Amino acid sequence: MIFERQMVTACIIDDDDIFIYGFKKFIEIKGVFAHILNFSNGKEAIEYLKNPNYAGNLPDVIFVDINMPVMDGWEFTQNFEEIKPLFGKKISVYAISSSVDIKDINRAKNNPVIKDYILKPISESHVADIINSYQPRPGFGGLN
Amino acid sequence: MSFFEHHNFFGENPAHLARLINNINTGVWEYNTVTKKAKWSDGFYAILGYAPGEIECSYHNFFENLLYYHDKQTFLKATHYTGPGATPIAHIRLLTKAGGYQWFETSALKHDDGDGQFVYGVLNNINNYKIAEFKAAQAEFMCSETGRIARVGGWEIDAPSMTLHLSREIYNIYELYGDVQLDIEEAISFIEPQYRPVVTKAVEDAINLSKPFDLEVLFKSAKNNVIWVRTKGLPIIDNYGNCIAIRGIFQDIDIIKKSGLSMQSSINLLDDQNKRLQNFAYIVSHNLRSHAGNLKFMVNLFEETKLENDKQEIFSHIKTISDSLSATMGHLDEIVKIQSEIGKERKLVTFRTIFDNVKAILRANIDATAAQINADFSDAPQVNYIPAYLESIFQNLLTNAIKYKHPDRPPVVNCYTQRDDKHTYLIFEDNGIGIDLKRYGDQLFGMYRTFHQNKDAKGIGLFITRNQIEALGGTIDIDSTVNVGTKFTMKLI
């Protein structure tokens, strides 16, 4: 039997186009088996997650920027908490920001939705490890 | 026998009298002004510390050797008194055998007799009383001087009768002179109305609950001088724990309090500036970090990627980052400039002139959006301001009004000034998309805060506007309704 490694679906929410480009590029270069969803603010991401059409392609892990227009990272976590019961699977959320403001760091620590606070510039291998640790269980996630 | 004969030494035998005179603890003396002879009782010697006869008994000896030279005048005045009534009592200092000069009280009486004219009297040592009197006088002087210098007085409320006693200095602070007595209610009525309930409550609590108090309140004296005073009260309790009196002080602390208040306002100002600086430092570090982070990220990718196409794309991103870095540095320059320009001279600037300049600069944008711009500066045509700031304020607000115009209608801007007794206001209204203040109100004037998905948004304009206005001591307020419009009210000076 051939063991086929399944793809992890990672979601990146950031208003910085360059960061999103770079994120996708390093996933490609590092050979991380991941499918990437990207949104430029929290609102777009919430709309996607809520949409039943995409229920079969929900991410396993979300990296959300804190400082964004329209809906920032904090508001995203609130909205995420509300719609969480719809998902039918566990989705981990990481905050990702270049803010070294201790207020932001503590706020992230005290936010039950946020699993960890990753400071930009990111360590590619650290993020790769996180993504690789989310092996989707059979029957869920994308099959591409 | 008369009553007097019973209770007098009249007719006693002389030996009995001599014994009496010699044994009492008082000096008795007699001086014959004709023969110039003096007689001193044993007690006279004794109170000076001598045995009888140990020193020469003479007026000369007394006057020249025993009597302190400074008190000779006093002594003579008393002994040669010729006026009506009893001869006055003189307080004099005499040299004692072992105790140095001590205070004595002497009274003299004259008596004309067949064998000459006599002056006689008694001498008492009053040194201890005199010293105590001096000490008391000194203590009182110290106390009243301390009170006068410190502008502090003492008061006492007797709890059962609720009567109030105030020291002299308190009346001085009240600027009440002459024969005035205040009761508790009257004393409290000099305190400014907003503080009266606090003081009344404190006095009640002291009496009912034995709670001490220490209050700083505004007070208006009888001459209408409003000053800060401190009043502190300590309840005095009896054995059963009931308050029987309150004792306290009342002090004019106007100078200290006012300098304290002005220091507090300086501290608040500094605190404000400090917070803004810290906020600024975080923002700068955040923004520079994100550019620097991206740059590092892209450079890593550039090195790791093998495809020529990718390399080209990554390099174009590196160029973008480089431009963003320059733009950020430009923003920083602008902000630093605000601080350095504060010192620049303010000029009387005409709103209309500056506004027309800005309109001319933005002409292309105004025309492109068919914006209607109404301005009325008639209420306050001019203001003493830094011209560059006013220009920048107009430019930022006008640019925002156009940039965040409502998609369904051309922008309409109303800009006008208002003036009241003290301040000049600039009001700026638009009919744009507005902003949800509940969500963004606290971040609105922050640096690099953007709220709409507008690619031109830099999040710098309102931050700079606020900094310019606040740097000159003004304020900026916003009122906005989503899809209706936004109104900025700026107190310029």
Image (tube, grey):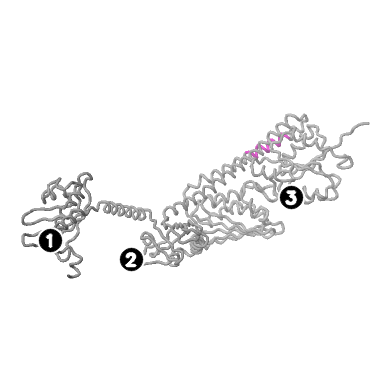
Q: Which mark is residue B178?
A: 2
Question: What residue is shown with label 1?
Answer: B110
Q: Is residue B420 visible?
A: no
**Which x, y percent locates residue B292?**
66, 36
Chain for numbered disc 3: A
Tell which tag, 1 or 3, sits nearer the viewer: 1
Task: Give the spatial CA distance, label 2 vs label 1.
Answer: 44 Å
Mark 1 secondary-structure assignment: strand
Q: Is residue B322 magenta?
A: yes
- Specify the label residue A78 is tagged with: 3
Residue B152 visible? The answer is yes
Could you tell me which secondary element the residue under label 2 belongs to?
A: loop
Q: Could you tell me the amino acid type at mark 1?
A: Lys
Q: Nearer the viewer, residue A22 or A123?
A: A123
**Element class at badge 3:** helix
Q: Is residue B462 left or right of residue B106?
A: right
Rendered view: A129 above or below B411? above
Q: Residue type at mark 3?
A: Gln
Disc tally is: 3
User: Looking at the image, is mark 2 or mark 3 nearer the viewer?
Assistant: 2
